[in-house]
Amino acid sequence: MRSDLDPQKLRLLVVGDVRSRRTTLLAEAAARHDFDVIVISYADFLTRCHDRDWIRPGTFVRIESPGDDKETTRLILKSGIVSMERMHRVPITATEIDARSFERGEVLHPRQWFLGFKDILQQMEFLWSHQGIRWMNSPESIVTSFDKQSCLDRWVEAGLPTAPGYREIQTYSQLRGVVAERHRRLFIKPRYGYSAIGAMALEWRDHLVRAITTVDVTWDSGRPRLFVTKRPRVLQREFEIAWLIDTLAMEEIVVEDWLPKARWNSVPFDLRVVTIGGRAQHVVGRANHSPFTNLNLDARRIERDDIETHLGEAWTHVLALAEHAAARISTGYLGMDLLVRPCRRQCVVLEANAFGDYLPGLLFQGETTYDTEMRLCGAVGKLQ
């Protein structure tokens, strides 16, 4: 055990990318709230999962984003091989995984990655839950939030507003058959993913088709490789759009109506609402002329106070909707994405983000998201 750990202090164990800024900011917030912090990688967990030096009864466990670490990506994809085979799917093999370069931003077998990540989190839950630890966010809730269709099913069952969708679309041809209107706007995204990976805004008007996508395609030895681009591409050739949708659909996709958004200074925007302990806390507006408002795609931030003033009486409804939607998935913390309709009196739930509390510099009541989380954890720990 590390000699500098104080047995009288509350302890936080973080599983994540030990070199990421996320982990650094979280550890700094935990230290400010008088926690001892241990940070381990996913590889550490898989090779030393029975290590008793990490946890003791009362330890808070934080599962963080695996990030873009290549070796972690390899471990996760390998963990998904057996699950893929059980689903009668053909996985990318361990040999192929070891041979891949895994360049930054590459879209890598989302379904196998999800199944591998799910397997690792289930191992954590099985090994640690009975040892008296406290999950900051449970493995089950993280798995659920990475499955967009599962989230939508829960919200629809609860009667919460979501964008109308189309189930089990497997090809572009099938989509055109299901959606028979001459003029239509649709939003397509991988079922398993985050940060607008593989997203496409699609519209057709009679025989004219156009798509805006975050996917860039390169070819390597006759094989396509898909990458996320910060500068969305516009596609206008139907065969190219059809090929990309068919390719993404092999990993499963979610298809919804592309709904118009309210505007801020003539720019469409939506909201990221961070719920912590079941309550809406930090809120940021995300404005972009592009259909994709993710902050990592250079959307402009709008301050909470400005959004509150802009929405007026609808503000309390927005916060309540975020809380109700989050409660269907987690009582820990989530980043909830909400779309405000142009009338500014209605909104719909778009997505849940397990690691959506990473918003550097965003304060609410003088605290960062991580400070709020650690303060609440500290209050719980001191009650025991």
Image (tube, helix red, strand yellow):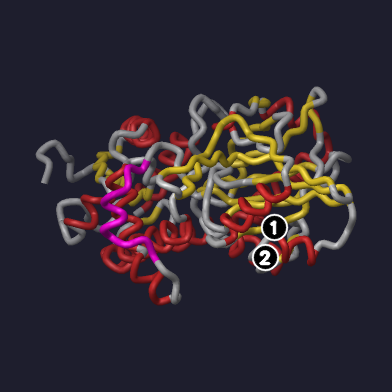
Q: Within the image, what quadrant is residue 170 found in?
A: bottom right
Q: Position of residue 105 (x, y in %)?
A: 45, 38
Q: Where 342 sits versus 78, above or below?
A: above
Which of pointers 1 and 2 indicates the residue nearer the eye?
2
**In this picture, residue 214 sits left or right of residue 59:** right
Q: Residue furthest front?
A: 222
Q: Position of residue 318 (x, y in %)?
A: 74, 44
Kindly state the secondary structure of the residue where label 1 is placed: strand
Q: CA distance from mark 1 to mark 2?
A: 7 Å
Q: Position of residue 180 (x, y in %)?
A: 86, 62
Which residues are the magenta region? 91-102
Instruction: Tell me the tag on residue 255.
Output: 1
Residue shown at the point (33%, 51%) measured from the top left: 61
Residue shown at the point (35%, 36%) measured from the top left: 23
Residue shown at the point (72%, 44%) measured from the top left: 237
Instruction: Tell me the tag on residue 201.
Output: none
- Disc 2 marks a residue whose amino acid type is Ile
Q: Where 100 sits versus 148, above or below?
A: above
**Residue 145 appears anywhere in the view:** yes
**In this picture, residue 261 sits left or right of residue 273:** right
Callout 1–callout 2 Cβ contact below 8 Å: yes
Instruction: Tell me the tag on residue 169.
Output: 2
**Residue 33 appears anywhere in the view:** no
Q: Quadrant of the C terminus?
A: bottom left
